[in-house]
Image: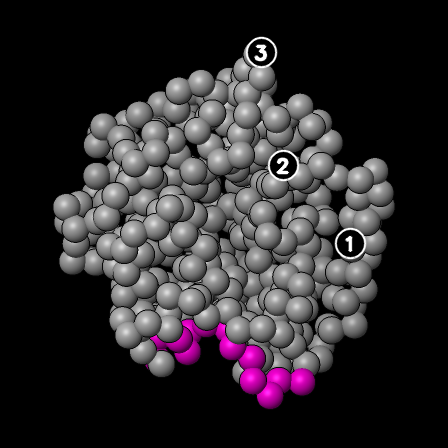
Amino acid sequence: MKRCRTCLLPEKFPNVKLDDNRICNFCLQGDYVSGSGIPKKRSSMAKKEEMKKDFENFVEKCRGLAEYDCVLLFSGGKDSTYLLYLLKHHYKLNVLALTVDNGLLNPLARQNIERVVKKLNVEHLFFTQGYDFFRKLYRYYLTHPGKRTFCDKICEVCSSAIHSIGLNVAVKKKIPFVALGYTPDQIDNHFFEIPKQKISQSWIPKEFFNEYFSDDDRSYFWSPKKIDNFPRFFLPFHVIEYPSVEVIIKKVSKLGLLSKRKASPGGTNCHLLWLLMYLDIKKSGYNPFVKSVSNLLRDNKIDSRRMLFKFFMGNWLLKAGVVKRKSIKKSLDHLNLSKKDIFF
């Protein structure tokens, strides 16, 4: 499969076109919004500064209004760990760290979470009531047809549920805002904040209105009713400095929060993600996370030669069944599925 010489996007990736020199249309646009490939106006940097001021002014105003100043959706990975540190020490916030356990949480991530919240002395809440719900969600999307990749669709719906749980906790405890450690290369639908218009609407996916799902299942998703003041939902790394991946790992390691080995996404991702990547590589020939990698490469946030080797060697080993076999088996066993049950 041909790939862009600059950012590694494969020619089969949606909306990608390679020129005669094997440079993709996203790279040729030059000035783009990270995570989308959409050209941006010259005024975007000024807009970014404006949004940063909005975030910091809001932080000042909301401090001390409730038992907690904000909810941070905390995965135990490097990015959410670094954001937790910034919220606690740079912005001086009383943070409630919230981890939604889908039943497939990596043990290393759990160890990281317990270490970090103790080290930073922040309150932490494990949400573990949704095991049956998440199992049902994953089984449905793995066994029903769809044009999108498994990672795109299942991660989108799963993330929506997790974000919903964060919002519901914020409403219940009257916490002014929810924060999420997504990095600029990961975001397509939002830039710095989930828009108020979307917060005012129901997030229940259309598939959840069929007979397979119940009212209890639908209740996990954000569905605002009779709420006067919605919490805001920020993705701060879009407006505050986000250095390179390597620098983030060095920072959390130097702070004594995570070791370099325990900060790697390869060790902290949930088990399901490895199954989804395996299926997508088998189905489409590429890993959907190449999009995030390509954005990091364009922004010079990762070493291109090192990433080229690690990413594509890792994909080959994953497809061949050499690595992450235990994680894939754990996911299948947890869902009571075999590879033959999954729709391709």
If the image is split into quadrants, where does the C terminus sit?
top left
Report the front residue among 142 and 47.
142
- Residue 21: image tag: 3
In the figure, is residue 179 to the left or right of 312? right
Residue 25: give x, y in percent of width and height: 61, 26
Mark found first going from the N terminus, 3 or 2? 3
Percent x, y for residue 245? Answer: 56, 35
User: How far apart are the alpha carbons under marks 2 and 1?
Assistant: 22 Å
Camera-side residue of 50 and 198 = 198
Q: Is residue 170 magenta?
A: no
Name the one closer to the observer, 148 or 81.
148
Label 1 sits on what residue type? Lys
Quick one: SS at disc 3? loop
Chain-order first, disc 2 or disc 1: 2
Q: Which residues are magenta?
A: 216-228
- Residue at the limit of the structure toward the bottom, as seen here: 226
**276, 109: nearer the viewer:** 276
* Above or below: residue 304 compared with residue 109: above
Task: Tell me if 254 is positioned left or right of 217 in this view.
Answer: right
Q: Amino acid at mark 3?
A: Asn
Residue 221 is a magenta residue: yes
Q: List the residue tagged with mark 1.
A: 52
Q: Kindly identify which residue carries mark 2.
A: 37
